[in-house]
Image: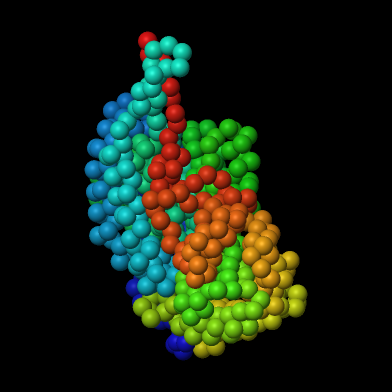
Amino acid sequence: MSTASPTPVSTSPLTYPDLFIGGEWIAPTTDARITVSSASTELPLGTVPAATEADVDRAVAAARRAFDDPQGWSQWEPSRRAAALDRFADELSARKSETAVRVSAQNGMPIRFSSAVEGTVPSTVLRYYADLVRADPGPENRTSQVFGSTEVQRNPVGVVGAIIPWNFPQTLAFFKLAPALAAGCTVVMKPSSETVLDAMVVAEAAIAAGLPSGVLNIVPGSGRVAGAHLVAHPDVDKIAFTGSTDAGRGIAETCGRLLKPVTLELGGKSAAIVLDDADLPSTLKSMFAVSLMNQGQSCYICTRILVSRPRYHEFVDGLTEMARSLTIGDPLDKSTIIGPVATARQREIVENYIAQGVAAGARITTGGGRPADFDRGHYVEPTVFADVDNSFTIAREEIFGPVLSVIPFDDEDDAVRIANDSNYGLGGTVWTTDLDRGRSVAARVDTGSIGVNCYTMDHGSPFGGVKDSGLGRELGPEGLLAYQQYKSVYLP
Ligand code: NAD
């Protein structure tokens, strides 16, 4: 464990006076501003304008003009859009270190992960969708079942409102921007107020890449006002949201009333099922990535670990040792594995859950408090709870912090029953030396994605949740379809 407090960033805070709307930096309608602070030093990192409803209106109008332009983005040949997206990917790649540093400084993600994920996924996903639309055969001609033929078109859905959380702000933004732009949509993106500085890098890259005016617009807003206004805006044709289940439910209600298509990527409480034949050393080696990555602030991670009763104590001991050995430190230090959680509020939420776990009778085997030797930063120790019953609040609600619940099970049926006894269904894993057995258990878990002896999100395959974890899918060709609508043209 590192013993040094994070070093305050010595450079002066970044100041963005203007908003990126209509392809240029323009003055906001008011002087309201968002100040972003470092999760580790708690010092200000920069400020950007807080977009008002009037600013959102201007951004939507710019996106609408760009979409409706008869010679514009939505009408371009897919190969021309693909070339523009490749240029955008190049410009983002050129800024990947800056992006990774901004993300880590803001939300506390260790730089080794933000460099590997936040710095690289945006350009990778852009290139994937550029290739996909380049290879798209276009409208399909079908022999009509009645008369003549039908041309089945897949057309861009229109102006997209993309609303992004703070935990993986770049990755989750490009899970939306890349397919939306590839499909020919134009976008108004609302980043989370905790992570707006990396979104400014996206604007800089878009300008450098020569994206046409209005194709991408960015409206940072504090609180829910700007986002809610974007969702209800009559000129926005589709909403793509990643965030909490509570906010998603409210957004879905608005979209339902307006009959507006919406994709919702929401919370999770996924289960890792460690079967009796699992190879414990290799399972434990993989456990950090599937359960504690980004201080537990990852939607898909397995925060409920279900372990076959005969292996339970052995596993708890190993997991405890693993969690205790993780290097806690400055997120900008390459050796750090566990940084601070993103905000003081988030730490308070996590600490409340830890207290609830103790009150319910669960046993802390490591962690449970704030690490010593950090006089600033929102740090929480990686915490393992043993003797957890799946009915405990810590096993039912998403904590979004480095807190794991280890729950014993009797047999496969019991494991599947506990895994499915959750309001959520986003990720999951099964650990076994028998791949066929792993696949058959995985098939019985109600979830949008699950791994056997691994969990590696694949940008070529659909990702999303069932139950309270969301609606619709991102990534893969299915993620492109989410930004297209079918039109049948009947021909003689
Ligand atoms: P949040 O719901 O508080 O906010 C997410 C975004 O929505 C922010 O930009 C916020 O300003 C905006 N927002 C909030 N309420 C809104 C409203 N009523 N109308 C319009 N916009 C609104 O979530 P968060 O705390 O930023 O992120 C953490 C949550 O995101 C966790 O629940 C996590 O599981 C979830 N998440 C899900 C996925 C997934 O793919 N399923 C991925 C990452 C995070």
| Tally of marks | 0
Residue 23, placed above or below residue 242: above
User: Residue shown at 37%/73% (left/top)?
Assistant: 112
Residue nearest the observer in this picture, 191 or 14: 191
Q: Position of residue 431 (x, y in %)?
A: 52, 69
Residue nearest the observer in this picture, 158 or 20: 158
Residue nearest the observer in this picture, 428 or 475: 428
User: Residue shown at 38%/72% (left/top)?
Assistant: 111
In this orientation, does residue 288 appear? no
In this orientation, does residue 68 appear? yes
User: Residue shown at 32%/55% (left/top)?
Assistant: 124
User: Residue placed farthest to the right in the image?
Assistant: 360
Colour pattern of the rendering: rainbow
State the quadrant of the C terminus.
Answer: top left
Residue 368, placed above or below residue 428: below
Q: Position of residue 89 (x, y in %)?
A: 28, 52
User: Residue shown at 52%/59% (left/top)?
Assistant: 439
Q: Is residue 190 shown left or right of residue 127? A: right
Which quarter of the picture shows residue 29? top left
Which quarter of the picture shows residue 148? top left
Q: Position of residue 386 (x, y in %)?
A: 66, 79
Q: Position of residue 221 (x, y in %)?
A: 50, 52
